[in-house]
Amino acid sequence: MAIQFTQTQEKILALAGADLPDTARPFQTIAEQVGVDEQTVIDLLADLKERKIIRRFGATLRHQKAGYGHNAMVAWRVPEDRAEDVGTIFAARPEISHCYIRRTYPEWTYNVYTMIHGERPGQTDEVVAELEQATGIDDNCTLKSLKELKKTSMVYFK
């Protein structure tokens, strides 16, 4: 069954789902824009997270604007029984913004994916080499970013 939100809740979610206000208290700023108090905004978001309607709430790194112009998606072939542990090692690296375990297919057997960001040419290759050394996993496919075409968050309410 679909969740029914009030117009006020939809306005809060639309603002919270976009770039948060660059203020000391962004939820208060959202509340003022909608005409409610700050606690109403916080309570709605906390309730939706607790009910697992939203998984997380966080910042998005605009890596190219932050100086990380050398980026690579690396697909790794990791034994299933090691995927969680290896993924934890990968995810601990500050250069990695995304780390996922995904389903494999007969024609594509890579199961762990990392998005690595570097400030200079070759840095992503260095991180891959260090991860190979740390985990003993050296079966991977590196897909380097050539150009960013789109980077936006999902919009659920306008």
Image: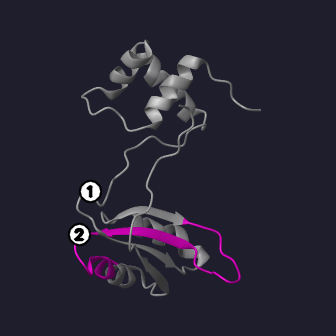
Q: Is residue 71 left or right of residue 108?
A: left
Q: Residue at x 61, y 37 (%)?
A: 53
Q: Is residue 151 left or right of residue 62?
A: right
Nearer mark to the viewer, of 2 and 1: 1
Look at the image and tell me in which quarter the N terminus lies: top right
Distance, label 2 to label 1, CA atoms, is 11 Å
* Residues at circles 2 and 1 in contact by the CB criterion of under 8 Å: no
Asked if the stretch drawn in magenta spans residue 107, the answer is yes
Disc 1 marks which amino acid? Answer: Lys
Q: What element carries label 1?
A: loop
Visual colour scheme: one colour
Q: Is residue 110 left or right of residue 133?
A: right
- Compared with 144, 149 (above or below) is above
Q: Residues within 10 Å of mark 1 (few under 14, many from 20)?
A: few
Disc 2 marks which amino acid? Answer: Glu
Q: Is mark 2 on a helix, strand or loop?
A: loop
- Compared with 113, 14 (above or below) is above
Asked if the stretch drawn in magenta spans residue 22, the answer is no
Give the residue pinned by disc 2. 119
Of callouts 2 and 1, the N-terminal one: 1
The spot of residue 130 in percent (x, y) is 32, 81
Q: Residue at x 61, y 33 (%)?
A: 51
Give the residue pinned by disc 1. 65
Q: Residue at x 52, y 45 (%)?
A: 154
The spot of residue 140 in percent (x, y) is 48, 84
Camera sees residue 38: no
Q: Report the residue that reaches farthest toward the right.
A: 1
The residues colored magenta run 101-127
The spot of residue 7 in percent (x, y) is 58, 18
Q: On the image, which quarter does residue 129 sit in?
A: bottom left
Disc on res. 38: none
